[in-house]
Image (cartoon, rainbow, N blue to C red):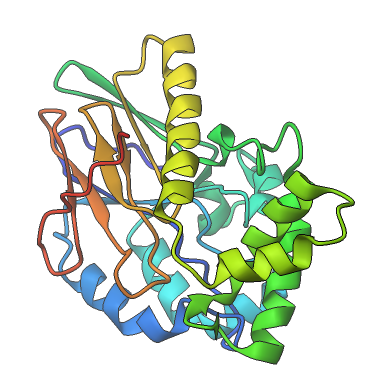
């Protein structure tokens, strides 16, 4: 991995989920938006892709590379650092493997930075998610994602105005909670087609609790930058989430300056003001 210039700004994006150009490819409609973002990055800046760059759980690996070969070549030419996420965790075995090619030389599991007397650590974020924790139940997330890809092929990217993948995630949560209760399909259908802000708030609170516990266990870390949840925002001055680039309004990027400050912005340059703390 190339050394990161301590004086250069670091741009962090996550969750591109590059697919194969079919209905399973949720990044495809926003491809030009990301390319325009790359056009605006200063030549001396360091780009960090904080995980889930590839949608390996839904798409054949070679088909993804074939679909996005020009973009991948551009990222490699920029010496962009690729952090391994849960959806592209198949790349984990290539980290530090001396194959001699440029892409695998840019892979890492996480990225530590020392800026302005602060220790900043960039992760993908699945490490803080019990549902996708690679040490526990990662295979369950993979199975559900594969099923979501098939649903998107048959029903499209949205059902009833909501993302197909999100609906299947809700279904899985209902199955876990209700178990063998026979009436869970009716309850799930009722709750899927109405807004549940309280449920989103509970999910956010649980995630932040896990991140905070991790930070307390690692007091040497001052700031955690991650993605994974597809919800861009900040919590105090210690946690920044870069959202997802496979949605209309969730895309964001973090800029880490030489003085250790971290700002979160949208592709149009506007600041992200969402506060994730409950």
Picture residue at 46% right of the left edge, 57% below the top: 196
Quarter occupied by residue 5: top left
Residue 190 location (% of width, % of height): 61, 69
Query: Does residue 82 appear anywhere in the picture?
Result: no
Query: Residue 181, relative to residue 22: is it above or below?
Result: above
Residue 165 location (% of width, % of height): 60, 69
Quarter occupied by residue 192: bottom right
Numbered marks: total: 0
Residue 163 location (% of width, % of height): 52, 74
Query: Residue 52, relative to residue 194: is it above or below?
Result: above
Quarter of the image where the N terminus is located: top left
Relative side of 103 to 181, left or right: left
Q: Which of 64 and 76 lies nearest the eye of the viewer?
A: 64
Picture residue at 13% right of the left edge, 38% below the top: 257
Relative side of 133 to 196, left or right: right
Q: Which of 66 and 162 lies nearest the eye of the viewer?
A: 162
Query: Does residue 93 appear anywhere in the picture?
Result: yes
Residue 125 location (% of width, % of height): 49, 40
Picture residue at 29% right of the left edge, 69% below the top: 249
Picture residue at 69% right of the left edge, 63% below the top: 187
């Amino acid at each position: 991995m190339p050394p990161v210039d301590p004086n250069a700004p670091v741009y962090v994006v996550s969750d591109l989920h590059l697919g194969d150009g079919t209905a399973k490819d949720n990044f495809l409609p926003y491809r030009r938006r990301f390319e325009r973002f790359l056009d605006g990055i200063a030549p001396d800046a360091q780009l960090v892709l904080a995980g889930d760059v590839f949608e390996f759980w839904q798409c054949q690996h070679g088909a993804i590379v074939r679909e996005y070969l020009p973009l991948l070549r551009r990222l490699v030419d920029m010496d962009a650092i690729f952090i391994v996420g849960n959806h592209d965790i198949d790349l984990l075995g290539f980290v530090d493997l001396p194959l001699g090619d440029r892409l695998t030389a840019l892979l890492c599991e996480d990225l530590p930075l020392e800026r302005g007397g602060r220790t900043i650590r960039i992760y993908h974020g699945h490490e803080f998610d019990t549902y996708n924790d690679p040490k526990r139940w990662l295979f369950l997330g993979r199975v559900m994602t594969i099923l979501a890809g098939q649903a998107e092929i048959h029903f499209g990217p949205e059902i009833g105005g909501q993302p197909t993948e999100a609906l299947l995630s809700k279904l899985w949560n209902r199955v876990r909670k209700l178990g063998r209760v026979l009436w869970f399909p009716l309850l799930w259908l009722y709750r899927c087609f109405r807004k549940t802000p309280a449920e989103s708030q509970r999910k956010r609170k649980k995630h932040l609790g896990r991140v905070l516990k991790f930070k307390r266990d690692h007091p040497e870390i001052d700031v955690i930058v991650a993605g994974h949840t597809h919800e861009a925002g900040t919590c105090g001055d210690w946690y920044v989430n870069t959202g997802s680039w496979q949605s209309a309004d969730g895309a964001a990027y973090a800029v880490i300056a030489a003085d250790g400050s971290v700002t979160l912005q949208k592709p149009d340059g506007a600041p992200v003001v969402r506060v994730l703390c409950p």
